[in-house]
Image (cartoon, helix red, strand yellow):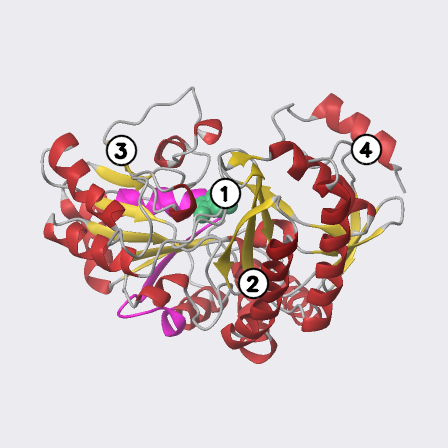
């Protein structure tokens, strides 16, 4: 086996330097089992970031691996020129889980592609061009999706796509209007209308948003936000596109989709990451009426979209979710995680805010609770301290000062307790430096 030093050396030599790596000394991972992974030096970690919320039913899940093996023995690839059973059965299953009348899918290979496809769909369907996205949001790395992104560090400086405007983020902890919920009446949502009236011709193709801003640091809008947004967007004849790339498939507890917490049905929904437990897949789902509009809009193909092996992996992943890791499970295990983090917030002044839903919990660290100065360095130290204790977590936020804690959906309360203990020990150590 190649040791970590030579892997890191080859990484430097043969991969672009813009690959962002976690930890002062990045660790190459070697194998995984359930909620645990091991690096090439044999160190074991409890994986509470799940490959960016992607290993949704755990590493090397037996059901998923068996389904993939079986399909690989039959047919690895067909392209979308030939219908295949796995493709249509998966589409049928997702239609069954999706809210409202969302029924027809277009499968691609990533969240970026799913969102790119959604914007093209909305522009084609409405005949309008302008799209409203949210500040502090993240939607991908392509030209359009990087332009939709509202975090400067993640916007690609080499591209500029016209017709994309950004409304205020529903970021209660750092309210852009300096108001307090609920007295604010969710005033930030009204900004969508203001942006439409002042910066567009008065018609829009779409409004796109994440139900919980993922890369942006698990910013969790009040449930009314999307109810107000939906009304405005439809009044201006745009489509409501909800990006469930991080939040989908029960991650936020109670419901299959995070937007359901707001009791709102989107016109278009995108998903990726956890949909196939690590196999590359993106999907854009919409109603038959909206999908119908693509008929007259030229030819398009996704060579790998709907790949039978990946679809088999996704079907097995959803099967595991339905049987042992359903939204209720995320709710129960997530509540335990949340209570533990809330208790830490009482003890450690570094914690400015705890937010999120289900198994998607964020902890924003600040050096001073009054000024809310972002504690970016404390997060860096906490990363090293949790790593030493055998725990992987994620980070995010405009200032990289938010911990993102997102175990596989198959994690149990025992795993949560193990993680909380490691986080608390690490936090106690780091708090001393601030
Ligand atoms: N949307 C959201 C909400 C995301 O978090 C991401 C990835 N972090 C994407 C889209 C893009 O997905 P991908 O990296 O698979 O292209």
In the figure, 336 relative to 282: above or below? below
Which residue: 57% across, 75% down? 332
Could you say whether the residue bearing mark 4 is in a helix, strand or loop?
Answer: helix
Label 1 belongs to which residue? 215
Say if the magenta span includes residue 109: yes
Can you give x and y, in whole percent of width and height, for residue 173 in the image? 43, 46
Say if the magenta span includes residue 272: no
Ligand 1 within 8 angstroms of badge 3 C-beta: no
Of labels 4 and 1, earlier in sequence is 4
Could you say whether the residue bearing mark 1 is in a helix, strand or loop?
Answer: loop
Label 3 belongs to which residue? 164
In the figure, 227 relative to 299: above or below? below
Viewer can see residue 120: yes
Proximity of marks 1 and 2: CB atoms separated by less than 8 Å? no
Could you say whether the residue bearing mark 2 is in a helix, strand or loop?
Answer: loop
Proximity of marks 4 and 1: CB atoms separated by less than 8 Å? no
Ligand 1 within 8 angstroms of badge 2 C-beta: no
In the figure, 320 relative to 187: above or below? below
Ligand 1 within 8 angstroms of badge 1 C-beta: yes
Image quarter hosting the C terminus? top right
Label 4 belongs to which residue? 7
Could you say whether the residue bearing mark 3 is in a helix, strand or loop?
Answer: strand
Mark 3 → mark 2, Cα distance in angstroms: 31 Å
Q: How crowded is mark 3: few (under 14 residues within 10 Å), some or many (20 or more)?
A: many
Label 2 belongs to which residue? 359
Q: In the displayed image of the protein, which residue is found farthest to the top?
A: 158
């Amino acid at each position: 086996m190649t040791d970590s030093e030579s892997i890191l050396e080859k990484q430097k030599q043969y991969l672009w330097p813009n690959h962002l790596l976690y930890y002062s000394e990045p660790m190459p991972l070697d194998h995984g089992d359930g909620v645990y992974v091991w690096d090439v030096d044999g160190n074991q970690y409890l994986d509470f970031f799940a490959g960016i919320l992607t290993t949704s039913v755990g590493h090397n899940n037996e059901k998923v691996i068996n389904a993939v093996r079986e399909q690989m023995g039959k047919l690895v690839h067909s392209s979308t020129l030939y219908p295949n059973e796995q493709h249509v059965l998966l589409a049928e299953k997702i239609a069954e889980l999706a809210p409202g009348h969302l029924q027809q899918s277009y499968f691609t290979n990533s969240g970026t592609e799913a969102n790119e496809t959604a914007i093209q769909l909305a522009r084609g369907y409405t005949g309008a061009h302008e799209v409203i996205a949210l500040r502090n949001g993240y939607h991908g790395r392509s030209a359009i999706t990087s332009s939709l992104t509202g975090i400067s560090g993640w916007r690609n400086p080499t591209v500029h796509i016209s017709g994309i405007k950004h409304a205020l983020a529903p970021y209660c902890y750092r309210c852009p209007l300096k108001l307090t919920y609920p007295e604010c009446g969710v005033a930030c949502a009204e900004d969508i209308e203001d942006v439409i009236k002042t910066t567009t011709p008065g018609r829009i193709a779409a409004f796109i948003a994440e139900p919980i801003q993922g890369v942006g640091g698990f910013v969790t809008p009040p449930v009314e936000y999307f109810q107000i947004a939906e009304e405005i967007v439809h009044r201006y004849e745009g489509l409501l596109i909800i990006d469930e790339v991080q939040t989908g498939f029960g991650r936020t507890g109670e419901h299959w989709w995070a937007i359901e917490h707001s009791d709102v049905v989107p016109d278009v929904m995108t998903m990726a990451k956890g949909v196939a437990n690590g196999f590359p897949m993106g999907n854009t789902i919409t109603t038959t009426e909206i999908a119908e509009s693509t008929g007259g809009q030229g030819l398009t193909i996704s060579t790998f979209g709907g790949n039978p092996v990946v679809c088999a992996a996704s079907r097995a992943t959803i099967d595991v979710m339905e049987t042992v890791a359903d939204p209720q499970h995320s709710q129960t295990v997530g509540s335990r995680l949340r209570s533990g983090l809330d208790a830490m917030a009482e003890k450690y002044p570094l914690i400015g805010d705890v937010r999120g839903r289900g198994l998607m919990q964020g902890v924003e660290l600040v050096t001073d609770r009054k000024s809310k100065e972002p504690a970016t360095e404390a997060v860096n130290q906490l990363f090293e301290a949790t790593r030493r204790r055998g725990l992987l977590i994620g980070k995010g936020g405009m200032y990289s000062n938010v911990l993102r804690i997102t175990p596989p959906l198959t994690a149990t309360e025992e795993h949560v307790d193990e993680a909380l203990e490691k986080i608390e020990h690490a936090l106690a150590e780091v708090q001393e430096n601030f």
